[in-house]
Amino acid sequence: MRGATVYAQGQPIDLAVAMQAAEWLATLMSGAATPAEKTAWQQWRQAHPDHERAWQHIESVSGGLRELDAQASRKALLQRPTAPPVSRRSSLRLLAWASTIGLTGWFGARSEYAPDFARAALADLSTGVGERRELTLPDGTRLHLNSGSAVNIRYTGTQRLLQLLQGEVFIATARETGMPYRPFLVETAHGRAQALGTRYSVRQAGGSTEVAVEEGAVRLMPRQGDGNLLLRAGQGGGMTAQQVLPAHAVSPDIWAWRRGLLLADAMPLRDFLHELSRYRHGLLGCDDAVAGLRISGVFPLADLDAVLLSLPDSLPVDVRLRTRYWVQVEARQRR
């Protein structure tokens, strides 16, 4: 990957520099950085303007990591670990790479694209884990970024392009009044979604892109496939890089995150915890024995520790803290 180019504050920067910035972030946040390491960090920042630019950007997009201790130390969740402890520095190093770099794939084989994980770390707009953001783009389009999301804005004289590098966005497109008409496009690792007077969401999830339309219509165009799919209001669908996926009806509940809520209707516990994990630092999982249990309710995303603590009240489970940043839900033990 050395020698690839990504962007910081709209300017190109070497991928190796972005990686170094992520390493320094993890080291300094570990709480165990030595005076020599702090001096070396300052010398690295001063060695080249790109170093300082990369540091300022990655620190800003990863600011949520500074709240890790406050979120993870909720006394009600602190129990004796049943697995060997992981050092604070190792945990933060892992989280810095996972949160600021991301675990997404490549943005296709076109030479101008660097790997997604580096581009997400240096994106034009981004949110940390548990953070949501709303803003207006230059043309009046309203953009809502969900937790752990990153986008680049690429407006030109011929198109309005939003590159979704990771996570999820909800878009209310503004009417284009200039000439020539510029279509509004969202580009992901799997293809493009063209808005047709629309309110809709786009989410990168695993090996596909998922789109749900609240108003208007959206056309999905896979990166490598020949087909396309038109989604209308009340419909959801998706695409891989090779093909479109079938359309289906969607509920307005899927956009509850914009109000800071997660709505579950007989959702399997494994899926429920997977959704919660998008808004909480660290690892959150469950044993196979309880993965199929169903849960319903309205849950606040602003206090996930309280949500986790409430699970034994409605399900036969125990919530265990394996390490500071690893919570596991298990079958309830006999007392």
Image (cartoon, rainbow, N blue to C red):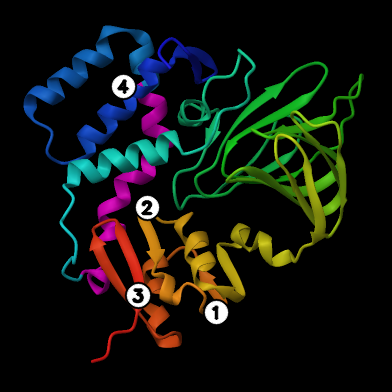
Q: Which residues are magenta?
A: 55-78
Image coords of residue 280 (percent x, y): 41, 56
Q: Residue at x 13, y 20 (%)?
A: 39
Determine the CA span between mark 1 and mark 3: 14 Å
Q: Residue at x 60, y 70 (%)?
A: 263
Q: Is residue 105 above or below residue 248?
A: above
Which of the two marks, 4 or 1, is nearer to us in this view? 1
Which circle's residue, 4 or 2, is located before the other in the chain? 4
Q: Which residue is mark 1?
A: 294
Q: Residues within 10 Å of mark 3 (few under 14, many from 20)?
A: some
Say which element carries label 1: strand
Q: Residues within 10 Å of mark 4 (few under 14, many from 20)?
A: some
Task: Indicate the quadrant where residue 77 lies.
Answer: bottom left
Which of the two marks, 2 or 1, is nearer to us in this view? 1
**Quadrant occupied by the C terminus:** bottom left
Q: Are marks 2 and 1 in contact (CB under 8 Å)?
A: no
Q: Viewer-proximal residue, 174 or 31? A: 31
Disc 1 residue type (three-letter): Arg
Determine the CA span between mark 3 and mark 4: 38 Å
Determine the CA span between mark 3 and mark 2: 19 Å
Q: Residues within 10 Å of mark 2 (few under 14, many from 20)?
A: many
Q: Which residue is mark 2?
A: 281
Q: Are marks 1 and 3 in contact (CB under 8 Å)?
A: no
The extreme bottom residue here reads 335
Q: Are marks 3 and 2 in contact (CB under 8 Å)?
A: no
Image coords of residue 64 (percent x, y): 38, 45
Q: Which residue is mark 4?
A: 20
Q: Which residue is mark 3?
A: 330
**Quadrant occupied by the N terminus:** top left
Which of the two marks, 3 or 2, is nearer to us in this view? 3
